[in-house]
Image: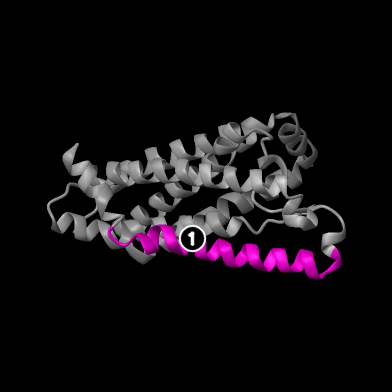
Amino acid sequence: MTRILQAARLHLVHPAVILGIPWLVVAISFAINLAVFHLTPAGEEEGFSGGVLALYITVLVVFVQAVTQLLPFAMGMSISRRAFYLGTALVAAVQALVYGIAISALVAVENATGGWGTGLDYWAPGIFEAGNPVLQVLYSGAPMLALMFVGIGMGVVHQRWGQAGTWGLIIGSLVVFGGLSILITWLEAWGSVADWFTDQSATTLAVGLPVALAAAAALAAYPGIRRVVP
C-alpha cells in the first residue's frame, strides 16, 4: 500500500499539470461560449454547448502523458509496474469524484442563474444533466473516469510498443469503428441503433456505459503495463 500511495503522489508533484491545465482549458472554452451567448443571437433562446468536452479530452491527454512521462521515472525509483498502475488508478478514481463534485456545483449555479443569465447549458448538456446534485456527481464523474482509463490505456500502449503501437491503436480503432459503420449502413440498421439508445435510461447512458468502458480499459491496460520495459 505504501508503494501505491508513493506512486499516486508522483502525479501530484506538479499539480499545475494534472489539475491546472484541464481547468485552464475548460475555463477558456467556457469564457468563449459565454461571450458567444451574450453577444450573439445564440443567447436569445436556451441552448446547450459541447464546450465542456474540452475538459474531458484534456484530462484524457493528461493521463496519457502521466503514464508516458512518469512510468519510467517511477521504475527508476524502484516502484513496480503494478504499484504504479494501482497508484495511477487511485488518482484517476479520486480525481473523477472530485471533478464530478465540482461540475455538479457548477451545474447548480448554472441552473440557479438561468444559464449564467443567457440560457447557456454548458456544464451538463443534454442527457448529462441529472436534475439532482448527488446524482449529477455520477453523471459528470463517470464519463471522466472512462476517459481517464482510456488515457491510461493509450499511455501503456505507447510505453509498451512505442509510436508503432500508438499509430496501430489509432488506425485499428478507425478500421473497427469504420467497419461497424459500414456494416450498420449495409444492414440499414441505424434506426435500430438509434432505438436502442433511445430505450436506455439516462443513467445507463451517462453512468452505466462509461463505467463499463472504464472497467474494460482498466482490464486491458493492466497486462500491458506489466510487460513495459524501462
Q: Is residue 208 magenta?
A: no
Is residue 149 positioned above or below 171 on the image?
above
Q: Position of residue 137 (x, y in %)?
A: 55, 38
Residue at 24% over, 53% down: 228
Residue at 68% over, 56% down: 50
In which quadrant is the C terminus drawn? bottom left
Evaluate whether residue 89 shows in this view. yes
Q: Which residues are magenta?
A: 13-41
Does residue 83 appear left or right of residue 166 in this picture? left
| SS class, disc 1 | helix
Is residue 70 positioned above or below 79 on the image?
below
Looking at the rendered structure, the number of numbered marks drawn on it comes to: 1
Q: Position of residue 64 (x, y in %)?
A: 39, 58
Q: Is residue 36 magenta?
A: yes
Residue at 57% over, 56% down: 174
In which quadrant is the N terminus drawn? top left
Of the residues shown, which amino acid type is indicated by label 1? Pro
Q: Position of residue 206 (x, y in %)?
A: 61, 37
Q: On the image, numbered disc 1 is attached to which residue?
A: 22
Q: What kind of secondary structure does the magenta stretch mostly adopt?
A: helix
Does residue 39 appear left or right of residue 111 in this picture? right
Is residue 195 positioned above or below 120 on the image?
above
Q: Quadrant of residue 91?
A: top left
